[in-house]
Amino acid sequence: MRSKRQFVVLGAGYAGMTVAVHLDNKLSEKNFQVILVNINAYHELVQDAHLVAGGFRSPEQVRIPISALIRETGIRFLQSGVGAADSTLLQINEAEETLFAS
């Protein structure tokens, strides 16, 4: 059997989370794996940053664990920073290791 093709989404902000979930919904049954890479283990509610700045919320109160957001999906989460991405080689590198390569 052929291994699953991978879609790698870099960043778990609003756009990254939306793309990852949408791709997973559309492609999970079609031999594709969605991999979400983010430096933090949480998604930050940026629209609530003013509440933190004003002292009405703590930073932890405007963060949602990514694991909670993808719990009922087939998305694989990798907490990592990205040192480089080379679309011509279809390769993503962390500082010291290759994370994904075609």
Image (tube, rainbow, N blue to C red):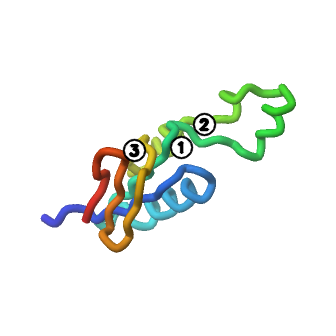
Comparing labels 1 and 2, the label whose residue is closer to the camera: 2
Query: Disc 1 vs disc 2: Cβ atoms closer than 8 Å?
Result: yes
Q: Amino acid at mark 2?
A: Ile
Q: Residue at x 29, y 47 (%)?
A: 97
Q: Quadrant of residue 58?
A: top right
Packing grade of label 1 (10 A; few <14, some 14-19, many >=20) is some
Where is residue 75 shown, x and y percent of the image? Answer: 41, 51
Q: Quadrant of residue 81?
A: top left
Badge 3 amino acid:
Leu
Q: Quarter of the image holding residue 91?
A: bottom left
Q: Amino acid at mark 1?
A: Leu
Q: Which mark is residue 69?
A: 1
Q: Are marks 3 and 2 in contact (CB under 8 Å)?
A: no
Q: CA distance from mark 1 to mark 3?
A: 14 Å
Counting residues from the N terminus, which is met first, the one under dot 1 or under dot 3?
1
Q: Is residue 86 left or right of residue 70?
A: left
Q: How far across and how far down the image is residue 17, in percent?
A: 55, 54
* Marks 3/2: CA–CA distance: 16 Å
Q: Residue at x 52, y 52 (%)?
A: 11
The mark closer to the camera, 1 or 3, is 3
Disc 3: which residue: 78
- Which quarter shows the C terminus? bottom left
Q: Residue at x 34, y 73 (%)?
A: 88
First in sequence: mark 3 or mark 2? 2
Name the residue rendered at 16%, 66% in the picture: 2
SS for tag 2? strand
Q: CA distance from mark 1 to mark 2?
A: 8 Å
Left or right, 29 with reference to 4: right
| Dot 1 or dot 2, earlier in sequence | 2
As rendered, which of 93 and 38 lies closer to the eye?
93
Instruction: State the mark number for residue 64.
Output: 2
